[in-house]
């Protein structure tokens, strides 16, 4: 219901905005991104393959429309506005955000900001560009790629910032923020069954992703498509965080997230996943055009009673150098998923556990069909150069290498180890 209302809101706002943009509080901004990718490795996960990139070798001879994104804002006054954001990827429209924001005017020590609706959370220090894009690279880090796929806050968020001496331009700012939300109960399925990924695509509020045809999906009668924004247990999740800022030169952020899902429930072919994690992130502007960003995340996800139990971790460090209209960014990602119990399922989804299985037995490699493998270990390196033409155009050249070991590839007769490479050229226009 929420996504239908938000989609209708976008259509109405688009029509009214064009008619009244010169005489009212409407404003329109957006981005258009066209690119060419040359990729080597496996078929993309978007086509049911085991690759981790958005494009694969079938796309090598084609010019790609990477993104058409538009955001429509309606400012009620200086303190509040309503925003709707949509993207078009590969012919599919994705409504990604629709929310009301309120920033009360205040010159005191405490400043507030409140959002209600559907929106990206406040804890990405990487994707700070227009429409939740990265100003540093075309493809996001593994962590923020996952956030764009499986996470959206459909609820209410508050952020409160304390300025030590607001009248004398204090160097220090301390913030507390948190949210209550719903419709994110299946979060955790993608990193468990597909693993981590690196790309630039966000899923819409009414969107789905296809999952590889793993044997376990048929046994547990899971939908062939993954729908992350569903409410299964009728109870909210939450996140809380804090942030310290020093003169806009250094930001340090701590976050804890827990969707509090009842992981024993199932609805419309989707299972509830109890997903929780903690993270630390920083952004340091060192001077002379140098910046360093980093993020580390660790958590756990559960699905079904006595069923899947996966720990996951990911981190990145990125060094950025900007000079004139040029920018060079180098990022290193590491990620893994650790299956806490290798699970054997019978045809009735009744048998769990691995206590009777001998991992050193010579028949181990021949008996994988009845097991659900979620273990993954990988890393990624990205080098991205960009050049700004005027105020609206941006040219980017980006090279990415991803290495991963994912045991579930054995289900398809593939080597668990996979190395992928991609060179991407992008021309982006901001409006």
Image (tube, rainbow, N blue to C red):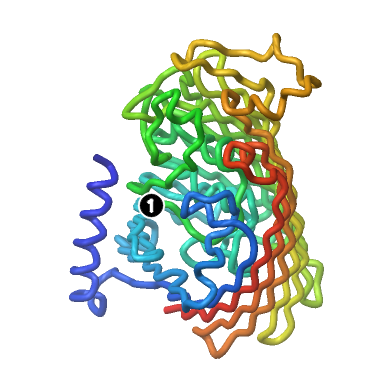
Determine whether 223 is above or below 404 in the image: above
Determine whether 416 is above or below 21 in the image: above
Q: What residue sits 39% from the left and 65% below the top?
A: 90
Q: What residue sits 60% from the left and 59% below the top?
A: 140
Q: What residue sits 47% from the left and 78% below the top?
A: 63
Return the x and y of residue 396 as percentages of the image width and height: 61, 78
Return the x and y of residue 18 as percentages of the image width and height: 22, 75
Q: Nearer the viewer, residue 45 or 99?
A: 45
Question: Mark 1 — residue?
Answer: 204
Image quadrant assignment for residue 29:
bottom left
Return the x and y of residue 66 as percentages of the image width and height: 47, 70
Q: Nearer the viewer, residue 9 or 163?
A: 9
Residue 282 can be seen, yes or no:
no
Q: What residue sits 63% from the left and 49% below the top?
A: 143
Determine whether 89 is above or below 418 in the image: below
Q: How many marks?
A: 1
Answer left or right for 32 relative to 284.
left
> Where's the C terminus, which quadrant?
bottom left
């Amino acid at each position: 219901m929420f996504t239908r209302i938000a989609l209708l809101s976008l259509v109405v706002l688009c029509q009214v905005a064009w008619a009244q943009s010169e005489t009212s509080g409407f404003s329109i901004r957006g981005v258009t991104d066209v690119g060419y990718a040359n990729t080597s490795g496996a078929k993309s996960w978007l086509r049911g393959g085991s690759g981790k990139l958005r494009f694969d070798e079938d796309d090598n001879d084609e010019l790609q429309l990477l993104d058409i994104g538009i955001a429509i804002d309606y400012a009620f006054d200086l303190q509040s506005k309503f925003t709707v954001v949509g993207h078009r990827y590969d012919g599919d429209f994705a409504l990604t955000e629709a929310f009301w924001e309120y920033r009360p005017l205040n010159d005191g020590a405490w400043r507030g900001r409140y959002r209600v609706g559907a929106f990206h959370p406040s804890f990405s220090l990487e994707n700070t560009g227009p429409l939740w894009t990265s100003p540093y690279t075309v493809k996001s880090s593994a962590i923020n790629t996952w956030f764009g796929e499986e996470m959206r806050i459909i609820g209410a968020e508050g952020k409160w910032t304390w300025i030590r001496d607001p009248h004398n331009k204090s160097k220090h700012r301390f913030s507390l923020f948190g949210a209550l939300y719903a419709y994110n109960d299946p979060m955790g399925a993608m990193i468990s069954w597909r693993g981590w990924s690196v790309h630039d695509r966000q899923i819409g509020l009414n969107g789905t992703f296809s999952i590889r045809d793993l044997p376990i999906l048929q046994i547990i009668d899971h939908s062939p498509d993954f729908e992350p924004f569903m409410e299964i247990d009728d109870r909210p999740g939450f996140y809380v965080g804090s942030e310290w800022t020093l003169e806009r030169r250094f930001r340090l952020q701590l976050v804890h997230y827990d969707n509090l899902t009842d992981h024993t429930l199932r609805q419309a072919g989707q299972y509830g996943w109890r997903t929780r994690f903690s993270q630390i992130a920083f952004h340091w502007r060192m001077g002379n055009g140098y910046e360093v960003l980093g993020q580390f995340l660790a958590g756990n996800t559960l699905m079904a009673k006595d069923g899947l139990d996966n720990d996951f971790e990911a981190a990145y460090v990125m060094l950025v150098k900007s000079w004139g209209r040029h920018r060079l960014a180098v990022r290193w990602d590491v990620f893994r998923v650790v299956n806490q119990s290798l699970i054997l399922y019978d045809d009735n989804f009744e048998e769990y556990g691995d206590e009777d299985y001998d991992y050193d037995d010579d028949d181990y490699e021949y008996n994988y069909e009845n097991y659900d493998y979620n273990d993954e270990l990988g890393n990624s390196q990205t080098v991205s150069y960009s050049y700004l033409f005027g105020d609206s155009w941006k040219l980017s050249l980006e090279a990415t290498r991803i290495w991963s070991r994912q045991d579930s590839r054995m289900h398809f007769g593939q080597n668990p180890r996979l190395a992928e490479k991609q060179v991407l050229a992008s021309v982006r226009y901001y409006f």
